[in-house]
Image (tube, grey):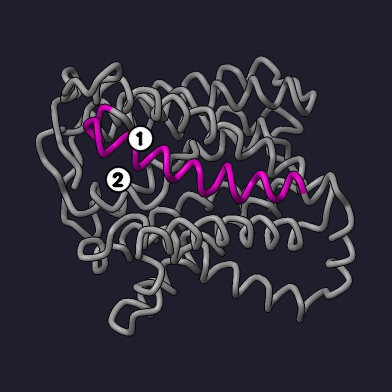
Amino acid sequence: MFRQTTPDAPAAKPTGVWSEFGVGLAMAVATTVIAALQPVVMRYGALKADPLFFSTVSMVAAALSAALVAGWKGEFVRIFARPYAPRLFALSLTGSLATSLLLIYGLHQIDAVAAVILLESEPVYSLILATMFLRERPSVRQLLATATILAGIGSVFGAGRAFSPFTAAALVFVTPLFWQISHVISLGVMPPLRPLCVTSARYVYAALVLVVVALIIDRGAFGELGNRDVMLAAGFTGAFVYFAGSLTWYGAISRLSLTWTTAFVIPGVPLLSFAFAIIFLGERPNLREYIGISVAILGVAALVTGADASRVSPLETVEAVHHPVT
């Protein structure tokens, strides 16, 4: 399904006014912008509403959007097919349920700027899991890039308020690990399942579980259903940030090299997230945070641009299950 090309020369086939490359590039830009919004809108939701309620409504909005599109494409019924349902459910618990709760509860106490820095750990987890489960030996460049990412994150620890309280920072820091675990779980279902079916299952199963959990733990939180601002923010997070972000990611990597697209998207997301946090939340990164994110971005860029674009590993293929958020 995904056409692989070299990072320097993505495939381009004219299709009227827009070429394949032009459409793919536009979708890569859209993915970058949407992914950059995630820490900001979730920080807003964590401050304005009960975290569990906001996470639940966001996931329901994503699930409804996914169900509509999956139903239109004839993919919805496969979500509950017996051979795939257990693995899809496990994928949903790790890739959507756990990550949404970890991120929202972490952002309830630390700001979006700190979260952006901590989320730069995702490529590190990807490299570790590829080494553990696919027996891939990391190159010297990958090891140096990983050390650079961790150095960038670690340099901010002494910046006072940034990662305080530590428990909240830890929740955000481990969030990408669960995204990456969901990729490993996906190895057994994609293929034969298509990305739209898999991502729809992630949102649908997670939404069902979150609704049940919210009703059991705190029914009173649903009193916020009448809060228009919270509902709009949660609906935007689910339908736009979660689901539309997934669609633009799929659209980009179906036209461009996965390696090239990742190298384009990932370094741009934290920079835009910083800008959005300043514009929409009024947060002001300090000098150490600027330095830390710059160092981490250099490490991420070195890691993703150093990948072998000609080799398509199973773990690389299932990266399509979610768009980058770091």
Assign a secondary structure to mark 1: helix
Is residue 75 on the magenta stretch? no
Name the residue tied to disc 1.
146
Which quadrant of the structure image shows residue 105? bottom right
69 lies above or below 84: above
Please give the range of residues in magenta: 232-260
Of circles 2 and 1, which is in front? Answer: 2
Furthest-bottom residue in this view: 82
Label 2 vs label 1: CA separation?
8 Å
Q: Residues within 10 Å of mark 1 (few under 14, many from 20)?
A: many
Is residue 251 on the magenta stretch? yes
Q: Residue at x 35, y 35 (%)?
A: 146
Between residue 181 and residue 56, name the one nearer to us.
Answer: 56
Between residue 150 and residue 111, name the one nearer to us.
Answer: 111
Q: Which mark is residue 127?
A: 2
- Location of residue 227 in the rendering, given as x and y in whole percent from the top left corner: 88, 52
